[in-house]
Image (cartoon, rainbow, N blue to C red):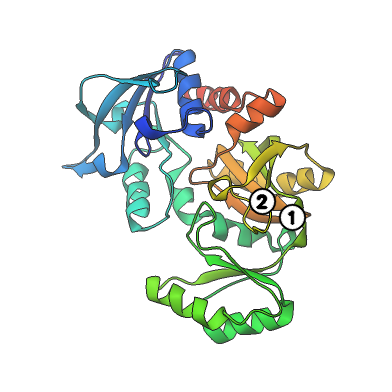
């Protein structure tokens, strides 16, 4: 079954072909006989009743410095495709949200992965709130007095932007820290959004585990270890990936959230677990499948396409 596949993503010419999950997913699609069309989110448009995109047919290869060839630029009607991948990186702003509304118009006749309605309604730091029994103590607030009261109860906390990504803007405030008011002023000046605060989990020193789920089922995990003196373990922030297995607690967490992910069309998801706690459920643009493949030989991209192909069949 040859599928027409469109990739809505950041510029493919600049990706790290040995780390980027979208590149690995697209390479697997090509190997399975599917055709690829690439466009960036700014080239998505609604025009007189049709959802259109301007971009390029592409051919990929795992060759550093020469990993993509482009066909002739074309404007296409996305409703004529079998699959559209929603894979641009956050920030999860109004531009991102608008793309989910447009792609809603063609889904599910054209299968959009992940389901754009639920990507919009289940961003990573909000979906996790539905599973409060699995998470560390958490608050989402804009009011400084509320945040101060949370810190007074828990002492050592993490403060971060609600719609941030890649570890940007993440701060640890321990019992002796005096910067909460200043940080609140800074965040308030940048945006009108609330912030998220969580009780600090000391186990992060041993790593922040990224568990990959496909259609609600765990397929494997990698551990991301922060640099010395650093709280953030994100690979964008210098975290080191290492091989790790799934614990019984990890499997319990996956069993608890898996049905929700499956029922709401979240085919490719990466969750973050620190110690025994679930901290994020990443549905917008999760990563980690290339590292998992290198460590454990698990071809997550193939598992993803098996699910998609079954849905299209």
Q: Where 71 sits versus 135, above or below?
A: above
User: Which residue of the protein is positioned furthest toward the right in this rendering?
Assistant: 248
The quadrant holding residue 211 is top right
Within 10 angstroms of label 1, few (less than 14), some, or many (20 or more) residues? some
User: Which residue of the protein is positioned furthest toward the bottom in this rendering?
Assistant: 145
Q: Residue at x 65, y 26 (%)?
A: 294
Kindly check if marks 1 and 2 are in contact, taking CB atoms under 8 A apart as contact: yes
Within 10 angstroms of label 2, few (less than 14), some, or many (20 or more) residues? many
Q: Mark 1: which secondary structure?
A: helix
Q: Which residue is mark 2?
A: 226
Q: Where 53 sits versus 94, above or below?
A: above
User: Which residue of the protein is positioned furthest toward the left in this rendering?
Assistant: 48
Give residue 213's position: percent from left, percent from top: 64, 38
Q: Is residue 262 visible?
A: yes
Give residue 141's position: percent from left, percent from top: 54, 75
Give residue 232's position: percent from left, percent from top: 62, 56
Give residue 57's position: percent from left, percent from top: 29, 22
Q: Which residue is mark 1?
A: 205
Q: Where 124 sits versus 21, above or below?
A: below
Number of residue marks: 2
Q: Mark 2: which secondary structure?
A: loop
Of residues 12 and 8, the one nearer the viewer is 12
Q: Residue at x 58, y 41 (%)?
A: 269
Of residues 275 and 169, the one nearer the viewer is 169
Left or right, residue 104 beside residue 141: left
Alpha carbon separation for disc pair 1 and 2 = 7 Å
Q: Residue at x 45, y 25 (%)?
A: 26
The quadrant holding residue 5 is top left
Label located before the other in sequence (1 or 2): 1
Q: Residue at x 70, y 51 (%)?
A: 273
């Amino acid at each position: 079954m040859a599928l027409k596949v469109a990739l809505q993503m950041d510029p493919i010419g600049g990706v790290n072909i040995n780390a980027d999950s979208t590149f690995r997913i697209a390479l697997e699609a090509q190997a399975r006989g599917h055709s690829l069309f690439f466009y960036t989110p700014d080239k998505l448009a609604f025009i007189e009743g049709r959802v259109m995109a301007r971009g390029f047919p592409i051919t990929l290869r795992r060759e550093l410095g020469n990993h993509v060839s482009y066909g002739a630029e074309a404007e296409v009607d996305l409703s004529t495709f079998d699959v559209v991948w929603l894979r641009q990186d956050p920030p999860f702003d109004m531009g991102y949200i608008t793309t989910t509304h447009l792609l809603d118009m063609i889904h599910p006749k054209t299968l959009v992965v992940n389901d754009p309605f639920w990507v919009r309604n289940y961003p990573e730091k909000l979906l996790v709130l539905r599973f409060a029994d699995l998470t560390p103590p958490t608050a989402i607030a804009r009011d400084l007095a509320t945040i101060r009261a949370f810190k007074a109860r828990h002492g050592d906390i993490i403060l971060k932007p609600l719609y941030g990504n890649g570890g940007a803007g993440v701060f640890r405030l321990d019992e002796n820290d005096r910067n909460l008011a200043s940080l609140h002023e800074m965040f308030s000046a940048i945006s009108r959004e609330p912030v998220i605060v969580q009780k600090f989990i000391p186990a992060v020193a041993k790593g922040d585990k990224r568990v990959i789920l496909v259609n609600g089922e765990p397929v494997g995990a990698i551990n991301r270890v922060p640099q010395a003196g650093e709280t953030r373990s994100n690979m964008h922030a210098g975290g080191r990936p290492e091989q790790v297995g799934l614990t019984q607690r990890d499997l319990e967490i996956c069993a608890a959230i898996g049905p929700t992910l499956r029922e709401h069309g979240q085919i490719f998801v990466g969750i973050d677990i620190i110690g025994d706690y679930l901290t994020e459920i990443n549905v917008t643009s999760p990563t980690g499948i290339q590292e998992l493949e290198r460590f454990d030989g698990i071809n997550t991209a193939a598992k993803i396409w098996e699910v998609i192909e079954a849905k299209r069949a």
